[in-house]
Amino acid sequence: MAFYLIKAKYSAQGFRGLLERPQDMADSTKVVLAACGAGPCEIFYSISAGALILILELDARQIGALEIVIMCGGDFQEVSSEEMMRTQEFKSSSILAKGIIDVLHGEAKPAAE
């Protein structure tokens, strides 16, 4: 599973709905996230982006399903997701990348040999 930053930008219709019926979107959002099997999450609202912001743990199948569900309702005009990694994972990726570059420059042999 990976962590994702998801930004769901409200449509004009969705934004009007928030003004006409002010509510905390966390409760309904948590129902959707539980139905798709998402791990722990944080839910935010970005006024400057006009978007619901989620940080949660999902696999590729779940993120695809969640994006479909978000776009089906009509309250959002677009959704984007960005996969994130912990700093320790990035360090491990950097070490692997260095090894690949060393092989490409002839400074090391491929690990499979």
Image (cartoon, rainbow, N blue to C red):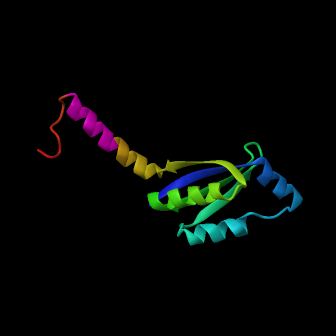
Q: Give the residue at x 59% y 71%.
A: 34
Q: Viewed as shown, does residue 14 lie left or right of 105?
A: right
Q: Viewed as shown, does residue 49 lie left or right of 105?
A: right
Q: Viewed as shown, does residue 49 lie left or right of 88?
A: right
Tell which of 51 and 105 is nearer to you: 51
Q: Viewed as shown, does residue 101 lie left or right of 30?
A: left
Q: How many marks?
A: 0
Q: Give the residue at x 22% y 28%.
A: 105
Note whether residue 59 is visible: no
Which residue sits furthest left?
Answer: 113
Q: Is residue 45 above or below residue 25?
A: above
Q: Position of residue 47 (x, y in %)?
A: 77, 47
| Magenta residue span | 95-105
Q: Is residue 32 magenta?
A: no
Q: Is residue 10 above or below residue 21?
A: above
Name the quarter where the C terminus is drawn. Answer: top left
Q: Position of residue 74 (x, y in %)?
A: 71, 55
Tell which of 88 and 11 is nearer to you: 11
Note whether residue 52 is visible: yes
Label the magenta part by its dominant secondary structure: helix
Q: Is residue 99 magenta?
A: yes
Q: Give the residue at x 26% y 37%.
A: 100
Q: Position of residue 65 (x, y in %)?
A: 53, 60
Q: Give the residue at x 82% y 64%.
A: 23
